[in-house]
Image: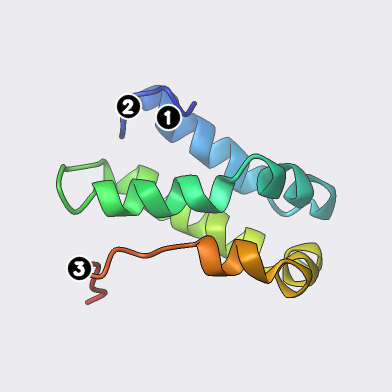
Amino acid sequence: MKDQEDGSVTQRFCIAILQKMSIKEDLIEVFMKNKMIDWIIKLIERSLDIEIHTFSLEFASALMANILHATSTLEYLQKNSSFTKGVKFNSNLSIS
């Protein structure tokens, strides 16, 4: 999925499937191990420069919310402050 063109049909379906699967706590650790939070942040940042299908952005945001809401993620972030500090947001990113 990471090699798919942003907003492509394949990417949209993959993100939607991952978002639906993200309600399963067991899978959250797999998402964290595969740096899904970083990938989602970069996708959102890229959307500032290029148009990315809204579906991709909405489901990716919902996926990130589910990942961040999981108990295992919160525990991981508390124990691994270096990961938390390493997550960088574009300073030009504004939420309206």
Closer-to-camera residue (90/48): 90
Label 1 sits on what residue type?
Gln
For badge 2, the amino acid type reads: Ser
Q: Residues within 10 Å of mark 2 (few under 14, many from 20)?
A: some
Looking at the image, do the residues carrying marks 1 and 3 touch, with CB atoms under 8 Å apart?
no
Q: Residue at x 41, y 55 (%)?
A: 41
Q: CA distance from mark 3 to mark 2?
A: 25 Å
In the picture shown, does residue 3 fall above or below 89?
above
> Mark number for residue 11?
1
Where does residue 22 sit, x and y in percent of width and height?
A: 68, 50
The part of the image, by quadrant, that contains residue 10 is: top left
Query: Which of the image's four quarters has the C terminus?
Result: bottom left
Dot 1 or dot 3, earlier in sequence:
1
Residue 81 sits in quarter? bottom right
- The residue under the point 54% across, 69% down is 85
At mark 1, the secondary structure is: helix
Location of mark 2 (residue): 8
Between 38 and 52, which is closer to the camera in this rendering? 38
Q: Is residue 10 above or below residue 36?
A: above
Q: Element under label 3?
A: loop
- For numbered disc 2, what is the local secondary structure? loop
Label located before the other in sequence (3 or 2)? 2
Q: Residues within 10 Å of mark 1 (few under 14, many from 20)?
A: some
**As drawn, 26 above or below 8:** below
